[in-house]
Image (cartoon, helix red, strand yellow):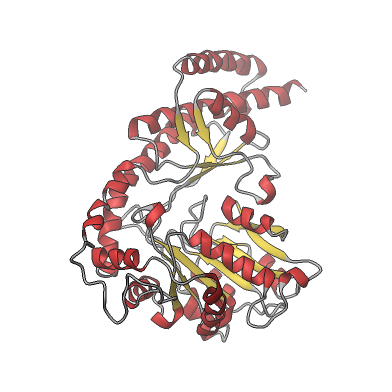
Amino acid sequence: MNKSFKQMNENELKSLISDLEKEYVDIKAKKLELNMARGKPNFDQLDLSMDMLNVINSQSQLVKNMDYRNYGILDGIDEAKELFAELLDVTTDEITVFGNSSLNIMFDQISRGYTHGYLGEKPWCQEDEVKFLCPVPGYDRHFAITEHFGIKMIPVPLLEDGPDMDMVEEYVNNDKSVKGIWCVPQYSNPSGVTYSLDVVKRFASLKPAAKDFRIFWDNAYCLHHLYNDKQDHVANIIQLCKENDNADIVFEFCSTSKVTFPGSGVAALACSIDNKKDVLKHMTVQSIGHDKINQLRHVEYFKNAEGVKKHMEKQADVLRPKFEMVEKILSEQLSGLDIGTWSHPLGGYFISFNALNGCAKDIIEACKQAGAVLTNAGATYPYGNDPEDSNIRIAPSYPSVDELKQAALLFALCVKLVSAKKILKEKSC
C-alpha cells in the first residue's frame, strides 16, 4: 500500500527524492522522443478510413440536382445535410455543411459577430467591452480565438455535470456585455465531463441581457465513445432552445475531423433558420462553396448515421486500450500518494490530471527534459493562466502503445519527483 507523501517526515522525503532522481537520470539517458501534446489520431485510426478514398472515382455520378464538380451549393449538398441532420437530430433546414474544420466555422462566427453583428444587432467592435464565458479547464483553441479578437474571457468552473450554471445565469441574464460562452458539452476537452440534462435545460432557458448572446456548442466528441455499454449522451440543445422560444441563442458545431481524416473531413453548423440565413448572407461574399466532392465521398462511404456509428466502434477499439493503459499506470503509480487526481472519461480524446497546486509547470518541464512533450501548463485556462498551476492535459491517442506506456511511466515519475520536492520544501519552512 502506497504511503501518502504528505504523511512522510523530512528524512523519508529526502530518501525518496534521492531514489526518484536516480530513476529520472536513467530515463533521461535513454533520449526518448515521446509526444502527448495534442489529440491527434494515430496511424491505425487514419488507416480505418482509407477505403473512403475509393468510393468516388471518374465513373461516379457527380451530376445530380446540380453539378457537384462546379461552383455553388453554398450550404452543402443535400446528402451531406441529411447525414449531419440525422447525427445531430435536427432538420436539414438547420444544417449548413462546410469544409474540413469546425474550428474555421467557430472563428468565422466570432468574426461575424465582431465585424457585423448577429441578426441586425450592433457589431461587437462598436461595443465598449465584450466578454465571453469560458468553462475551465477548457479547450485552448477556443480561448485563442477569443483572445485574438480582444474579447475579455471570464473563467467559469466546470463541475461534474457541466459549467457552474448559477454563475453562468448571473452573468448572462444581467450583463449586456456578455456575448457568448464556449461549451464542449460531451466528453469535454480535457476533463471528459458530459453536461447533465438539467444543465442543458438551464442553458436553453437562459434570458440573456444581450440580444446577440450566443452559446458556442462545440459538440466535437458526440460520436467518440470508448465503450458500447457505457456511453454518455448530451441532450439536444437545438430542440430544447426551440421549446423555450430561444431558437436563435445557440450555434452547434461538429465535424468528421477525428472520424475520418482531420485534414480532409467535413464540418457542419446546426442553428436556427434565421441564424442560418444570417450566416449565408456573409458566406455569399466569402465563398463560392466548399468541397462538394469530399462531402459526397463521406456520404457514399458512411451512407447514414448507423454507418458512422459502426466506424466509430472501430475507432474506439484502437483508442480504448490506450486510455485504459494510462489510467492503469496512474493508478498503480500514484494512488494513495495524495499528490494528484485524474479523470476517468468514457469518451473523447483526453485525460485531465490535477497535480498539487504549483506543480504543473515543473512536471511538464521535467517530462520535456526527459523526452516527453505534453500540452503547455496553463493551456486549459484563458490567457494560458491556470491560477493554481495544477491542471495538465494528457492526450493518449497519437503515440503507439509501447511509446504511450513509456510516456505514462515517465509522467508518473515526474509527478512524484516534483510533488515530493514541493512537500519537502513546505515541511522545511
Where residue 17 appears, x then y in whole percent? 59, 17
Front in this rendered view, residue 247 or 233: 247
Could you tell me if residue 184 is visible in this image? no
Where residue 115 appears, x then y in whole percent? 68, 70
- Counting labels gives 0
Quarter that holds the C terminus: top right
Could you tell me if residue 41 is visible in this image? yes
Front in this rendered view, residue 48 or 380: 48
Query: Could you tell whether 2 is left or right of 223 in the image?
Result: right
Where residue 201 appears, x then y in whole percent? 54, 75
Residue 350, compared with residue 167, is above or below; it is: above
Q: Residue at x 45, y 80 (%)?
A: 94
Q: Residue at x 22, y 54 (%)?
A: 51
Q: Residue at x 39, y 33 (%)?
A: 404
Residue 75, compared with residue 372, is above or below; it is: below
Front in this rendered view, residue 394 or 263: 263
Query: Could you tell whether 124 is left or right of 206 in the image?
Result: right
Residue farthest left in this picture: 59
Where residue 134 appears, x then y in whole percent? 64, 59
Residue farthest right in this picture: 128
Residue 62, compared with residue 19, is above or below; it is: below
Residue 202, compared with residue 148, is above or below; it is: below
Residue farthest front in this picture: 70
Q: Residue at x 68, y 63 (%)?
A: 132
